Amino acid sequence: MPSFDTVCEPNLVEVKNAVENSAKEIGTRFDFKGTSAAIELKDKEITMFGDADFQLVQVEDILRNKLTKRDVDVRFLDKGDVQKIGGDKVKQVIKVRNGIEAEQAKKIQKLIKDSKLKVQAAIQGDAVRVTGAKRDDLQAAMALIRKDVADVPLSFNNFRD
C-alpha cells in the first residue's frame, strides 16, 4: 500500500555551516569591533550575544542571510526572549525546530480526515504517515498539506509505492 511520511527536519549540517559563517562575518565586520557580538550553536540551539537589542537584530539578520544562501528555511527557527546577562550585555536563544509537535500533527491528521480523500493519516512519533490505495490520492494529500499548513516547513519523505 503506497505511503509517505510528513516530517519537519532541517539540514543540520547546513545550519551548522551557516552559524559558523555568521560567526566569521561578525568577527570581521567593522561595526562589531570591540563589542561582545557573537553567535554559537549547541545541540540544536543557536545562542546570539550582543551589547544591545539592536545588535541582536543585526546578528540575527546575518544568520538569516546565511541560512537563506544555504537553502535552509528560516521557519525552522523558533526565537526565544531576549535575556540580560549582566552589565549591559544581552543574549537570545533560538531553537532549531526538529520534528512535528503533537498539536500540529493532530491538525494535519484532522485536515486529511476532513478532506474526504481516500487516505489515512497516522501519527508516528514526530512524523505523520499518510497511506492510501492510489498514488494520485497521496499526491493530492501532499498538495493539501502544503497549501493549508504554511507556518511549519514540512517535507515529505519515505515515499513507498
Image: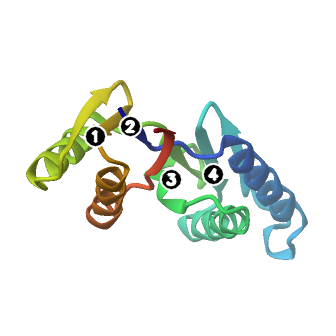
Drawn side of residue 1 relative to residue 119, left or right: right
Residue drawn where x is 80% and y is 55% of the image: 23
Q: Residue flagged by tag 1: what amino acid is it?
A: Gly
Q: Which mark is residue 3?
A: 2
Query: Tag 4: Cα neighbours inside 10 Å, few (<14), some, or many (≥20)?
Result: many
- Dividing the picture into quadrants, the one containing residue 69 is bottom right
Drawn side of residue 84 relative to residue 2, left or right: right
Which mark is first along the chain, 2 or 3?
A: 2
Residue 135, x across and y down, in percent: 37, 49
Drawn side of residue 74 relative to residue 135, left or right: right
Which mark is first along the chain, 2 or 1?
A: 2
Residue drawn where x is 57% and y is 68% of the image: 57
Q: Residue flagged by tag 4: what amino acid is it?
A: Met
Which mark is first along the chain, 4 or 1?
A: 4
Drawn side of residue 86 relative to residue 104, left or right: right
Residue drawn where x is 30% and y is 57% of the image: 145
- Name the residue beneath numbered marker 4: 48
Q: Name the residue nearer the viewer: 135 or 6.
A: 135
Query: Tag 1: Cα neighbours inside 10 Å, few (<14), some, or many (≥20)?
Result: some
